Image (cartoon, grey):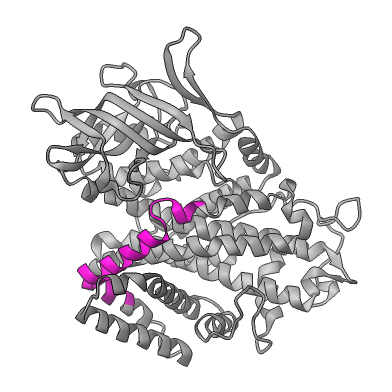
Amino acid sequence: MTTSSVPARKTGLDQGGNQVSPLTNYNLFTTDATLVAAVERGGAAWASQRITELGRVLGTEEAQRWGVDANENPPVLHIYDRNGNRRDEVLFHPAWHQLMRTSVTHQLHSLPWTEIRKGAQVARAAMMMIAIQNEAGHTCPISMTFSGMAALRAEPDVAGSWESRILSSHYDPSFAPAAEKKGALLGMGMTEKQGGSDVRANTTRAERIGSSREYLITGHKWFCSAPMCDAFLILAQTSNGLSCFLLPRWTAAGDKNNFFIQRLKDKLGNRSNASSEVEFTSAWAQLIGEDGRGINTIIEMVNHTRLDCAIAGAGLMRQALVQALHHCCYRVAFGKLLVEQPLMQNVLADLVLESEAATLMAMRLAESFDMRAGDEKQRAFARIATAISKYWLCKRVSPFVSEALECLGGNGYVEDSGMPRLYREAPLYGIWEGSGNVICLDILRALKKEPAAAEALLHELQAAKGADQRFDLFANAIESDFSNMMKSFAGAGQEGQARRLADRLALALQASLMIRHSSATNAQAFIASRLGYDHGANFGTLSSAYDLPAILEPAIQPFSGA
């Protein structure tokens, strides 16, 4: 890698000298070779043009500005109108609506439900990944609408009355009954102040109206995501136990429902999006699924949201990497471009490996969602891989973004760089839909109660055996561990080691994907550093035995100005 390979003054430096101009007007999809290949491999080539167009739009300076404006002008809650009546409306900056309109138009909220064909989940995951890179906050209601349909279909009559608006590619932000709108969005409310993730401790009550499947809900939700949505999937207690309900903002009669927003959360990140505390006072709702089995009903929404959490982790890593690569291709320090400095090459190459493995993992998970309807092995794989991927990618993203931010030095700590927004966003997905401990316990639960999940994961690892002895040994050890676990689940003893197990399963899955889908150079470096422990505690500690420029060259090419 030489200075001549990276033109120092083409588009990267501004008129002030050794300051790097913002990265604008690039295509978020076509510049990501790993993602492009995953779309092709996952049977979604039919959507390439659509994804390419979205990648182009989101890379423009105008669309990037939408994200900035939506975060600098967060939503505002209006509890009362001018006459003192309850209004309970959240208002957003126009930039938020531009973001929402773009994502809804491109069907990020609905594609797998409207395009019943191979690769629909993969295509949608690719678009979600690049949308998150542009501005992550607005993808919360997009994700919940997409995920909510999976649960809503447990009640065909209710789903039938909502589907045409939920699946519509028309974004309609008006505060009006859904029947009067061209498009509708779904939110969710599961957790309460006394229980959090322990939703069985929920105290919100549902009282049945006569012999119908209509109920009146009284209680609260400590976290109600995106309260401007048209309806919410919530959990409440009936006489038969915790049940799932669809609670709209407006009743069937066209009156405002008794859905009262208490306040918006003042959050670390995700500031463009509204998260709230709400109370219900005899709010009208419809039962979804079987009375008393609300968790079983809403779990499909949870699983699809966890898929999006994994995609978000990979997306944030990719955007942080892109910003670091772009900066280092133009910034000169100590007589060389940063990208030519040996130690910076080590850091960047390490980040390239981590981001590539993250993208492969997220897209493989999306592929399994595509195939699981007609393939029991893929369904079992999706069951265990969703938890593994959600846990691992959401844990890795925060230190990754921190390291990428440091590549920009002091400039990375300044809001104008966009890196602080990524950094504040990064911890969210480790919390959303289950913190790390909750997810790791879910992995144990899957292994204990669903032997097919363990078999599916081992089958996935088997496909990569024979290419690298270190991987083979690592995979064999996991198989042995599974065998011992099946013989005896030691309760708290196993629980205390759940994170250790989750780490190993995630690394094994990523290594298998790197072997099958990455270059030999990248796969070997990943395995040596992650499985062979030829690596320090921080990024940038790859062994000198590996060809770091060979890892870097393909990654920097789209951002070097060459």
Horizontal side of residue 530 vs 240, given as left or right = right
Q: Residue at x 56, y 82 (%)?
A: 529
Please say whether residue 555 is one of the residues in the magenta stretch.
no
Q: Answer above or below: position of 31 versus 348.
A: above
Position of the N terminus, as image quadrant, is bottom right
Q: Is residue 6 left or right of residue 55?
A: right
Q: Is residue 525 above or below residue 129?
A: below
Q: Give the total number of marks visible in the rendering.
A: 0
The residue that appears at 54% across and 42% down in the rendered structure is 267
Majority SS type along the magenta span: helix
Residue lying at the far left in this picture: please name it: 211
Where does the C terminus fall, quadrant-wise? bottom right
Image quadrant assignment for residue 337: bottom right
Say whether residue 430 is magenta: yes
| 525 or 375, nearer to the observer | 525
Q: Is residue 533 visible?
A: yes
386 in relation to 272, above or below: below
- Asked whether, in this view, residue 498 is left or right of residue 137, the answer is left
Q: At 73% from the left edge and 53% from the top edge, which residue is drawn? A: 413
Q: Whole-percent x and y of residue 561?
A: 78, 62
> For the magenta stretch, what is the residue range?
428-457
Going 62% across and 57% down the picture, which residue do you hit? 319
> Which quadrant of the figure has residue 383?
bottom left
| Position of residue 238 measured from the top left corner of the image (x, y, whole percent) | 16, 37
